Image (cartoon, grey):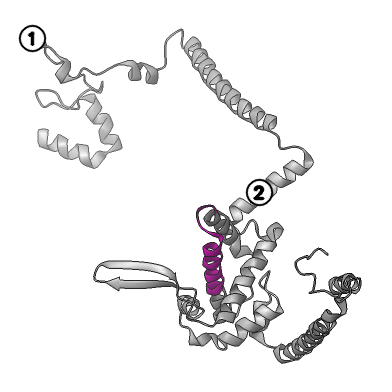
């Protein structure tokens, strides 16, 4: 007879074991053991019915059941040990109450961290661990969560037991925020929205057969081709302008091509070029007489120019 794990937990499995034992000469000796198992199962079901009646209408249990992977027994256990969330002023205190905080020893400037304290109630710690394992089983729904992505990253570097305890501590902190703010578990806060949109668009494209590597190469080639076309257009426009001006370049291009002489590059015998005038004639002669430009400016800005004319006159 082959022993299978969990064969005694179901009625079908127990019946198969009994059938196999009946074929043996002394197989009926184990019959009382199977009777005790069935009686215990009946008692457990009756206790669960009573607990459902007691937990009916309990707000804390209702909030805990909104967490994916958290069943009725885990919710009852967590609610029973927390009792009142106002007892804990911060999420860290709830985690340390559950025994999920690391052991710390300080001496002057040296700080040492050890394993978890395990000072809290063991059933509460077990219930939080079971919630993590429930989330782990729901990979199809939880693989985009930041919490479970961090779980997978830590699992590559650490032992699985330490990773589960670290995630259970995070779950305890999330539960503290849920119960203190009286809010249900929010799935949108567990997912990065930008990454989720990108992943969904890629999934849709892959399902339609549109997203392939060749398409990505075509897009990249089209971008480079578009840039080359734009540069060619600018060159053609510059040539057309030059042809319209009679083969002369525009004034802006001529100014940009002219390089101003730097003082450091001049030889000792050479002198700096004289500064060119702006092209506008002066309003007054060297003798102080008013010119025609001054009379024209007086019409535009009469007050300023009249004062200068009075000074010279």
Q: Is residue 58 above or below residue 66?
A: below
The C terminus, quarter of image: top left
Q: Nearer the viewer, mark 1 or mark 2?
A: 2
Image quadrant of residue 185?
bottom right
Percent from the top left, x then y, of residue 287?
9, 23
Percent from the top left, x then y, of residue 55?
70, 88
- Residue located 69% across and 31% down the image: 215
- Residue located 75% across and 37% down the image: 210
Side of 297 relative to 215 (left or right): left
Farthest residue, direction top: 247
- Whether the magenta-drawn stretch holds residue 180 is answered as no
Q: Secondary structure at mark 2?
A: helix
Side of 90 relative to 219 (left or right): left
| Residue 313 shows up from this direction | no
Percent from the top left, x then y, of residue 127?
62, 76
Q: Which mark is residue 269?
A: 1
Image quadrant of residue 250?
top left
Stretch of the chain drawn in magenta: 156-174
Q: Which residue is mark 2?
A: 199
Q: Secondary structure at mark 1?
A: loop
Calculate the distance from the C-alpha at mark 1 to the C-alpha at mark 2. Answer: 72 Å
């Amino acid at each position: 007879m082959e022993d299978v794990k969990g064969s005694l937990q179901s009625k079908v499995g127990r019946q198969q074991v009994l059938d196999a034992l009946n074929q043996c000469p002394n197989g009926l000796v184990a019959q009382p053991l199977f009777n005790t198992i069935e009686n215990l199962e009946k008692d457990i079901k009756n206790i669960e019915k009573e607990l459902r009646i007691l937990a009916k209408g309990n707000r804390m249990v209702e909030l805990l059941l909104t967490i994916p992977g958290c069943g009725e027994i885990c919710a009852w256990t967590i609610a029973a040990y927390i009792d009142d969330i106002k007892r804990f002023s911060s999420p860290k205190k709830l985690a340390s109450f559950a025994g999920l905080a690391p052991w710390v020893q300080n001496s002057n400037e040296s700080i040492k961290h050890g394993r978890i304290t395990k000072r809290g109630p063991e059933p509460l710690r077990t219930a939080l661990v079971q919630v993590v394992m429930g989330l782990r089983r729901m990979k199809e729904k939880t693989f985009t969560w930041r919490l479970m992505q961090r779980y997978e990253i830590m699992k590559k570097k650490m032992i699985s037991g330490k990773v589960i305890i670290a995630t259970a501590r995070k779950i305890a902190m999330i539960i503290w925020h849920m119960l203190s703010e009286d809010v249900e578990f929010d799935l949108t806060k567990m997912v990065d929205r930008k990454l989720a949109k990108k992943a969904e668009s890629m999934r849709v494209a892959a399902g339609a057969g549109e997203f392939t590597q060749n398409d990505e190469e075509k897009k990249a080639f089209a971008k480079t081709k578009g840039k080359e076309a734009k540069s060619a257009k600018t060159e053609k426009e510059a040539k057309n302008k030059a042809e319209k001006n009679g083969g002369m370049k525009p004034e802006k291009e001529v100014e940009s091509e002219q390089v101003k002489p730097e003082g450091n590059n001049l030889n000792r015998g050479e002198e700096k070029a004289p500064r060119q005038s702006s092209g506008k004639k002066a309003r007054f002669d060297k003798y102080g007489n008013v010119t025609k430009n001054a009379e024209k400016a007086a019409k535009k800005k009469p007050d300023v120019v009249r004062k200068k004319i009075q000074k010279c006159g």
